[in-house]
Image (tube, rainbow, N blue to C red):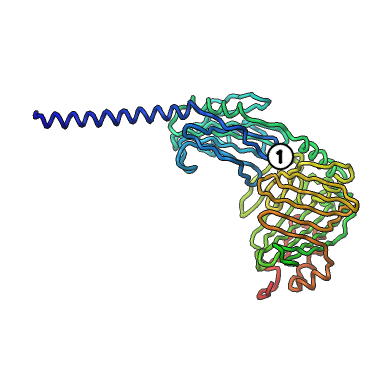
Amino acid sequence: MTQTDLKKYSLAEVVLFFILLLGVGLAWLSVRSKSDIVFTKPIVVNGLGFGVCLPDSAGWKADSDWKFKDRAFYISSLVGKDQESPSSQVLIEFSVAENNDIDRRLLERAASLRGSLGSIFTISAGGVKTRAAEIFVRSRQATVFCGIADLGMSRTVQIEILDTGGSGQWSRSLMQDVAARLVYKQPQELKTGAEVIASVKKNSATRWLKTQPRESYYFLTYNNNPDSGFLAELYAFKKDQSRYNLHAVNAYFVRDLGGEESFFQADEDLSQWVWASNLLDDRGTRAGRVELYFGSEGSLSIRRDGQAELAYPSPASFSQMLFNAVLENMAATKIPSVIIDLIDSDGRIIPTNVKLVPEKAGFVAQINNLDGSNIKQTLTLDANIKLQSSTITGPRNFKIKPASKDVVLAEFSIWSDYIQSLDRLLDSDTQTPQPNRSRRVVPNGSVI
C-alpha cells in the first residue's frame, strides 16, 4: 500500500465521518423540532367562542386564520415544504353541524384512512373532553392520532396529528398538548338564537307566513348598475295539504351574472321540509341542482351533482327561505341580537349574527356572516317586517328595492312567461317541483 493509497483512505474516512455527523445533526434537529415546541396564542373563530393554539416554532409553520367550507372551519400547522407532503401536521376542524357520536366517527375516520384502530383514550382539560384514537396507516408508513370533542349545539372539534415515520409516543404527547389548549365558551347569543328558532317553529313561522302577500317583487342593483336584475318571492299557507302546509318559491336573476330558483315546502312546525334549487347561468339556463331534505330525526340530507351527504344542524339552525319569520319573532319578543346557523340553498350552514334595531318607522336588521367572508346585509323594514330596502356588501355588492309585478314584467319582458309560472309552482303538491323539462327558462335566442 502506497502513501497515496493511505491518503485516499484517510480522505474517504473523513468524508464518511462528516456524513455520519450530518445525519446525527439532522436527527437531533428533528427531535428538537418535536420536543421544543412553542404554541401560538389562541387563534379564535370570530364571534363563536372557540379557539385553538397551534405549534409555531422549531420548523413548524402555523396558519394565521381559519378557513370556512360548507359547515366547518379549518386551520393547520405543519413541518415540511408544503401541505401536500408534510412530515408532520396538526389539522383542526371546528364544525357547526356534525354528528356527536364520537366513537362511531373515530371508527369511520380509521376506515376512511384505510388504517387500523389502536388505543383509545380521553383527554379532559378546560371543560372540554376529547376522545382520541391512534390510527396506523401502513400504506403511508404513518401514525395518525385523531381526537374529537363534543362542544354541544352540534358543535364539534376534530384534531388530527400526522407524523410520517415518527414516534407514536410523540404524536400522542402532541395530541394531549393541543387538546389541553382548546378554548371554548358557548356564546349567549347562540343560546338565545336556539330559543328564538324553537319559538319560530312552534308558532311564529305560520303566523308570519299568513300575514305575507302571496307575491312580492323587487329590483336588484348589482355593482351600482340600476335595475340589473329582479327578485320574486311567493308564499302560501296550504291548510288542506296533508303533509306540507308552508309553501315558498323564490327566484332571482341578474344580467351578466345569473341567478337561482328555489322551491320550498314544510310542515307547519318545520320539523320536516324539502328544498330544491336550480342555479341559472347568465343565459338563463339551468346549470345545476341541489336538493335538501330535513327530517324529523334532525338530520339534513344534501344531494348535489349525484352525490349525497348528511349534516346535523343545531337547534339554532334555520332555512334562509323563511328568514324573515326570525326577524318577526325577534321584533315581537324585543330580542336585539342572536346567532343562528343559516342554511342556504347549497346546503351550507353558516353561523350568522342577526341584530334588530327598532326605528320610528319600523326596524333596521343587520346580518353579518361569521364565516370570514365579510358578507354583510342591512335591511330596512316596516313595522310588519316588510322589506323596504336592502344593501348587501362583500365580494359582490347588491341593493334591493320593492317594485310592482307589472314594472318588473315590463323591464324583464323576456322573463314574462317564467315569472307568471311561479304562481302555479307555488301551489304544486310535489315535494320537489320541477318548473318544466327544459333546461332553458327563457326562449332560445333571446337577449337577456
Quarter occupied by residue 18: top left
Q: Is residue 59 left or right of residue 234?
A: left
- Of the pair 220 and 324, the residue shown nearer to us: 220
Relative to 388, residue 180 above or below? above
Residue sitting nearer the eye, 91 or 115: 91
Circle 1 SS class: loop
Q: Say if 222 sits above or below 73 in the image.
A: below
Q: Residue drawn at (80%, 56%), measured in percent from left and top?
A: 248
The residue beneath circle 1 is 47
Q: Residue at x 65, y 26 (%)?
A: 129
Residue type, mark 1 in image = Gly
Q: How many marks?
A: 1
Q: Residue at x 49, y 42 (%)?
A: 83
Horizontal and vertical percent position of residue 326? 82, 47
Q: Is there any visible trace of residue 368 in the rendered image? A: yes
Residue at 53% of width from left, 34% of height from top?
56
Residue 155 place in picture, x, y as percent:
69, 36
Residue 159: x and y in percent read 58, 33
Residue 288, position as x, y percentages in the image:
64, 59
